[in-house]
Amino acid sequence: MSPAEAHSRIAQDVRSAKSSFYWPMLFQAKAKREGLFAIYALARILDDIADGSTTQRQKHNELYGWRTWISSCFRNEAAPQTDNPLKIGLYDVIKKYSLPLDPFNALITGMEADVNGPIIAPTSLELEEYCGQVAGAVGELCLIIWGWQGKGAQAFAAATGEALQLTNILRDVREDAVLGRVYLPKEALIKADITARQPLDIVNDPNLSMACDLVIRRAKKRFRDAEALWPNNARRDLQPALVMLKLYKALFEKVQTAGFSASAPRVRLSGLEKILRFTASYLNAS
């Protein structure tokens, strides 16, 4: 399978996923779009492994397989033998953009944390590290594809990644509890006087909203941090990174409005909202 054929298959899979990120990724030059799709598809398949129904050993084996395969891309000048479209596309993207190995390893380490879990009430520092692994690392790779790297880019990726991941945590707090996970930090539970440590007991505590409010404050700060780190002279081909931040901020605002009661619906941006927010954000970023 040629790289072009592999990228075509990856694009089909990403389109089928119906992600909020699809439209910002779509409106790119072809090479950058292929790179972004490959990174997104990798993050999604790793997440599917971590959340899948196989045994813990099988999950670790699959994640280790991806870790060793990606590492081999950095050791070999020739593409490792494979008929997997994502692997073929990833090798092409790694070489084309000289992507670093560390963010890939960080992403896989974050997924391994979920497999080793369940994660229940991590410390704030542990949660920050986790957000950096599962979201910040992806952001760093995407920014390199867009042409921004260095300390400023890494700080923006870290702030954006944490803001986005905290939004997901708040939106999915009850769904995660059913799966035996609670990502709300221990410090927030203590301040909200929630003494339970069983996931369903935590989300059914009457003080849940108070604990979530403390996480909301942190997410707001990280959204502000990311916006402040945005370069004033950002090139036009970097603007989709800011568009993605604005789209997720819109989702974050809806999560706050919906609240965290058992009757609250799962929040998502409608197709129309995505289009309107995407258009407004892109024009404002121009």
Image: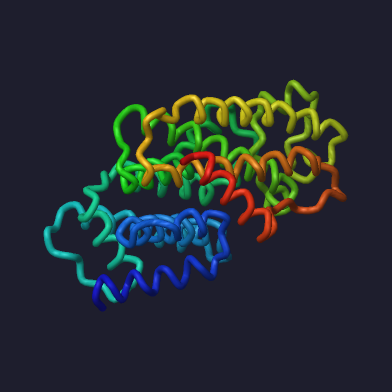
In the image, what residue occupies the spot 73% across and 51% down?
Answer: 267
For the question of whether residue 65 can be seen, the reply is no
* Image: 252 above or below 55: above
- Relative image position of residue 33 (x, y in whole percent): 37, 59
Residue sitting at the far left: 77
In the image, what residue occupies the spot 56% across and 59% down?
Answer: 19
In the image, what residue occupies the spot 43% across and 36% down?
Answer: 157
Image quadrant containing the N terminus: bottom left
- The reply, left or right, for residue 183 in relation to residue 102 is right
Q: Quadrant of residue 238?
A: top left
Q: Quadrant of residue 241?
A: top left
- The reply, left or right, for residue 71 in relation to residue 247 is left
In the image, 101 versus 268, the foreground residue is 268
Residue sitting at the far top: 191
* Image: 241 above or below 52: above
Residue sitting at the far bottom: 1
- Relative image position of residue 96 (x, y in whole percent): 22, 55
**Colour mapping:** rainbow
- The reply, left or right, for residue 202 in relation to residue 42 is right
- Relative image position of residue 285 (x, y in whole percent): 49, 39
Instruction: Say how many tags the image has.
Output: 0
In the image, what residue occupies the spot 79% across and 28% down?
Answer: 210
For the question of whether residue 87 can be seen, the reply is yes
- Relative image position of residue 279 (x, y in whole percent): 57, 51
In the image, 279 versus 150, the foreground residue is 279
In the image, 64 versus 161, the foreground residue is 161
- The reply, left or right, for residue 191 in relation to residue 225 is right
